[in-house]
Amino acid sequence: MPDLGETYACVPSTERGRGILISGDPKSDTILYTNGRSVLMLDLNNPLNVSVYGEHAYPATVARYSPNGEWIASADASGTVRIWGARNDHVLKKEFKVLSGRIDDLQWSPDGMRIVASGDGKGKSFVRAFMWDSGTNVGEFDGHSRRVLSCAFKPTRPFRIVTCGEDFLVNFYEGPPFKFKLSHRDHSNFVNCVRFSPDGSKFISVSSDKKGIVYDGKTGEKIGELSSDDGHKGSIYAVSWSPDSKQVLTVSADKSAKVWEIENSNGKLKKTLTCPGSGGLDDMLVGCLWQNDHLVTVSLGGTISIFSASDLDKAPLQLSGHMKNVTSLVVLKSNPRFILSSSYDGLIVKWIQGIGYGGKLQRKENSQIKCLAAVEEEIVTSGFDNKIWRVSLHGDQCGDANSVDVGSQPKDLSLAILSPELALVTTDSGIVMLHGTKVVSTINVGFAVTASAIAPDGSEAIIGGQDGKLHVYSVQGDSLVEELVLEKHQGAISVIRYSPDFSMFATGDVNREAIVWDRVSREVKLKNMLYHTARINCLAWSPSSTMVATGSLDTCVIIYEIDKPASSRITIKGAHLGGVYGLAFTDDSTVVSSGEDACIRVWRLTPQ
């Protein structure tokens, strides 16, 4: 079984105009955040140390460690809370249906016995507190008329719960069992986050009205505010206290994070932190966490910045990645440690094996991406804008970009590696041959095309159809001449790839079968590759042409050795939640995969 070498984590899912509430475990210095159906546990001291929990049936929204760090409670968009082990295979302890809509925040009581959750109750209840082991209710939470965006448990006795939300209210409850005590309407807009100080003496609420208000933790009375002189210029989305209860960190739509000293109940600005960025919409800050010496902020684009609390002038460590399905992977031949990945939202990220995140490639033409190919100093992309872009690469920077419109949406893109000016693009209506960014011919092949590949030397092309047939053409000048048709597949062809030594090609279909063919004799070289349970999305050859790997919608990667029967395959189960969409070998013992979970994983193959 291959070993998981590294995981390059996806970034937190974000939504414009909403904060996200991240949390962590001070003992292990791990933070928790969600993306799609995944809950991610990321080690702040070693970002390549990532663990992913993918058992929610709906998009996960928030997750928290229990006070002893042994359990995690995570919630989702359906109103369900799952409680599972923080270590040991994440074994499920309990599952409760808590609200009738999305849960936005949840917190454990300091003794780890109760959980409070808040969110969208679809007109019914917006807050519930329950025993963690039985799900029994421990209170009545009246007083809110709209979605409750945040809730907090007082970390010291006597226990209190405070909530806030879209009705501009901050409500205070005494218990257990918890009962409504009082309500504040000091904010004039959505109240996005409320948090108790670790010593329980105060709590603070922050709002889209740009204000932060401080209250007495025991009585719930208002006692102060964050100074407005140097306050935020946009909605404040989240707030987090320092471990000593003397300072708070706030983040805002104004793209800044601020550290405040809470003296005599009022907040005095200590420092404004600016995260490096282009100053665009994606740099708005939507989440934060103060954990030990780490000040963590999250931007709308998903970038995680980690500042040092003891040295606020130090530049932050920045981690980023994909937020959406990673549909293609390319390994740079000149340096196989460098991996480029693209997601359909148009983002191209560079990764360095052993280091992780190596930066985003900023393209001038920010179009969505369907296919990505790369040769030495150039990347070629096709998108939903009917265009093929050729972009020169200078180190980490994208240089000049040229495009050509191929008239309809490109389905597949293949470069002749030895003469990369030559490219083959398949569209619904047929084949487009390109030289650089010039269309040299558009060929209607008379059948529905689903996949294609051009030989490394540009001498032949293989076109796969909806009918499962493989049409082999020789490339003669600017036209294609059909040589023969291969019929072995039972479903539409989904992917075609030549081996690096040009002696073979491999094909995969939507009916879950892969086949390896001899290029000269056109005979089947490896058959019975029928071990996936759903469509094959991608395949890749090892550099030595001795192995081929397939990735499928069934979440698995299967690696076959060409000179062994298909039954001696190596299977990586559950490689990516939601399906595998990108595959590449960096060398003969390392496979890189990407998928719908927006993560990228590096697998080390151990000799059988």
Image: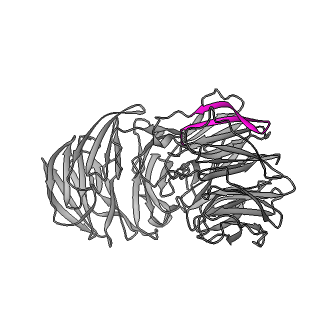
Describe residue 417's horizontal placement relative to residue 64 as left or right: left
Residue at 67% x, 39% y is: 249
Which residue is at the front of the view, 111 or 502?
111
Q: Is residue 268 magenta?
A: yes
Which residue is at the front of the view, 75 or 608?
75
Quadrant in which the N terminus appears? bottom right
Residue 521 in the image: state x and y as whole percent: 25, 59
Residue at 63% x, 27% y is: 314
Within the image, what quadrant is residue 469 found in?
bottom left
**Taking 57 as reference, is 233 above or below it?**
above
**Label tally:** 0
Residue 379 in the image: state x and y as whole percent: 34, 40
Q: How is the image coloured?
A: one colour
Residue 459 appears in the figure: yes
Q: Is residue 536 magenta?
A: no
Residue 506 in the image: state x and y as whole percent: 34, 58
**Taking 126 as reference, is 49 above or below it?**
above
**Taking 496 as reference, is 299 above or below it?**
above
Q: Residue furthest top?
A: 313
What predominant SS class does the magenta segment belong to?
strand
Which residue is at the front of the view, 564 or 6?
6
Within the image, what quadrant is residue 181 found in?
bottom right
Magenta part of the protein: which range?
253-274
Residue 30 in the image: state x and y as whole percent: 69, 47
Describe residue 397's horizontal placement relative to residue 479 as left or right: right
Q: Residue furthest right?
A: 157
Residue 499 appears in the figure: no
**Taking 120 as reference, is 546 above or below it?**
above
Quadrant in which the C terminus appears? bottom right
